Amino acid sequence: EVQLVESGGGLVQPGRSLRLSCKASGFTLGDYAVSWFRQAPGKGLEWIGFIRSKAFGGTAEYAASLKGRFTFSRDDSKGIAWLQMNSLNTEDTGVYYCARKKGFVDYLGQGTLVSVSS
Amino acid sequence: QTVVTQEPSLTVSPGGTVTLTCASSTGAVTSGHYPNWFQQKAGQAPRPLIYSANIKHSWTPARFSGSLLGGKAALTLSGVQPEDEAEYHCLLYYGGPWVFGGGTKLTVL
């Protein structure tokens, strides 16, 4: 069974950093790109970006508004992808989802909640 | 900044038909935007329904269909069921970044 499980969310103060994890099971993570989305409370989805598979260079695309603060990485041997978030502010509060992508997104995780507050 | 626009809310009767649309501030939505549609029920993660405008995932019920209509991406539900009440999100590709619409809250009443 394909599963993606996000973790690492929690309460963090403004200006601090947080690293989210996305653990894959039931398939080979290395065969897929990993996309990241987020959803602020009561709002729509926001595309954060994605990291390509090694076969496609392992490079990443980021939403322009987040580039420079957010960074993707992956360890295919462990089946894990990460989202490093720096200089967090209150507008970064929301549920963060990872998804697998091979041309299109087909499976998402259940999400992890990030709350940025003093 | 590119904006993708969806109807904020729609209401449909059980058994009825409804079309949700997804418009781009840059002009007509085409197959090159690879429109995706996601369904999100209250308290749940989004679930992909449609990709590349009209291709269904294996779990997508037959009553859901995607198309390009009048310069927009469209999601049509035919024979709506009560369990179709949800938020529907479209996602468009812009040659690098992808952009979500604001979502449509579909009420089945």
Image (cartoon, coloured by chain):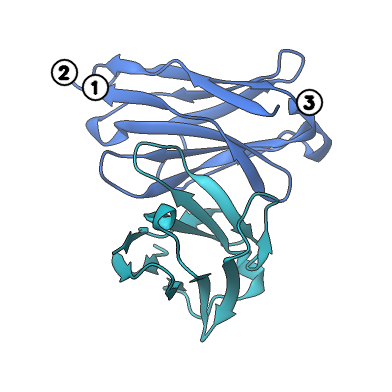
Residue B39 spot, x, y in % from top left = 47, 52
Compare residues A87 and A91 and report the one nearer the observer: A91
CA distance separating discs 1 and 3: 36 Å
Q: Amino acid at mark 1?
A: Pro
Residue appearing at x 39%, y 65% in the figure: B3
Comes first in the chain, label 3 or label 2: 3
Comes first in the chain, label 1 or label 3: 1
Q: Do the residues at discs 2 and 1 belong to one chain?
A: yes
Q: Which chain is cyan?
A: B
Q: Is residue B48 above or below residue A58?
A: below
Name the residue beneath numbered marker 2. Answer: A118
- What's the mark number on residue B76? none
CB contact under 8 Å: marks 2 and 1? yes
Name the residue beneath numbered marker 3. Answer: A28
Q: Amino acid at mark 3?
A: Thr
Residue A6 spot, x, y in % from top left = 51, 22
Name the residue beneath numbered marker 1. Answer: A14
